Image (cartoon, rainbow, N blue to C red):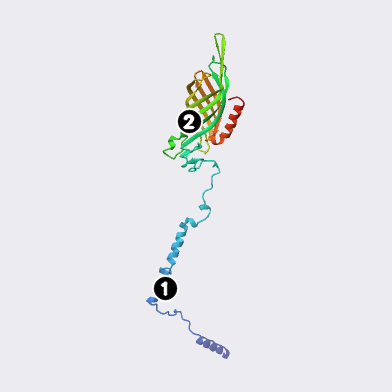
Amino acid sequence: MTPLFASFLFVAAAQAEAPEATTEPESTPESTPETTEMVAAPLDAAPDGGDQRNEDIAAKPDDADEEYGPFFEPDAPSDTSFPTTARKGKAPLLSVANGALCFVDGSHCKVSLLADASVAAGLRAPASNKGPDVPYAHYAFRGGLVMRPLMLGKKDWHPWGLGVVGSWSMGTGVVVVESMDGATDQGETDSTPAVRVGVVNQLWLSQRPHAMHIDFTLGAVRSPVLDSGIPLVGTHAEVAFGWGGWGAVYASGDFLDQDTRIGFGVRAHGIAAAPLIALAVLGAGLGGAL
């Protein structure tokens, strides 16, 4: 009993020395109005400069200049586009005022000057009782003015052009053989000059800078008939297929009294054709054809 009683007293003494645990929270000093304002201030408003930073952050997505990426790059050019396609606003070659006046005709010219040289060869057919058909050739110089009436008052492209042209040519002579009362009379000429004036209608086939076009010309021709030496007035007609204002192939006809001349030729702008035409004329003269 004595040891058991001693153990009981030892436990009781240890519990009496331990402090009692309290469940009440420790008291905090009472809050003052100043303390309340200091605590509530961060909740209601950001520190100085916080609003400005928020506005800058919100404005950044709207500023497209600072963005970069695949969604902000321009679209790639189409694979089906042609490098020779005419670009709007590009001035034609050798022109002033963005095509208002061109010295070499082009698809986007409003008014163009024509100045070219040509050579042609064909057939000269007198009347049946005026001698045989003979070969015919000539060289010519042409000038004029062509405009686009429907492009003068607006900027839209239009394929139709209208103009006036004049030309001078020097052709080969003719041989005339007539039989009267059993006698034969023969005459010939060395050369045949001719002057032509006509109205030309153009039809452009595309808007490319040096596009193809078809020209129809109808007018009058004044030239000596056969070997009479007397110039008469007849009808002149021509159809040409050209490449811009630099060159063309054409077929023409002069229809006079008892004298018809049909020719097929090529022409080129005077800037490029002058040396070639000079050589052709020189060769024809030295060969006795002119």
Mark 1 residue type: Val
Who is closer to the viewer here, 203 or 193?
Answer: 193
| Of pointers 1 and 2, the one earlier in the residue sequence | 1
The image position of residue 77, as x and y in percent, is 53, 46
What secondary structure is marked by label 2?
A: strand
Return the residue at label 2.
Answer: 165
10 Å neighbourhood of mark 2: few (<14), some, or many (≥20)? many
Q: Return the residue at label 1.
A: 39
Q: Quick one: SS at disc 1?
A: helix
Residue 178 placement, left or right of 43: right
Q: Is 20 or 147 nearer to us in this picture? A: 147
Name the amino acid, label 2. Val
Q: How many marks?
A: 2
Residue 158 position (above or below residue 176): below
Choose mark 1 or mark 2, whichever is in front: 2
Which x, y percent locates residue 150? Answer: 43, 35
Question: Could you classify mark 1 by the number of other residues whose Cα lies within 10 Å: few (under 14), some (14-19), or many (20 or more)?
Answer: few
Query: Relative to residue 193, is residue 32 depicted above or below?
Result: below
From this viewpoint, which residue is outermost toward the bottom? 2
Q: Residue furthest left?
A: 33
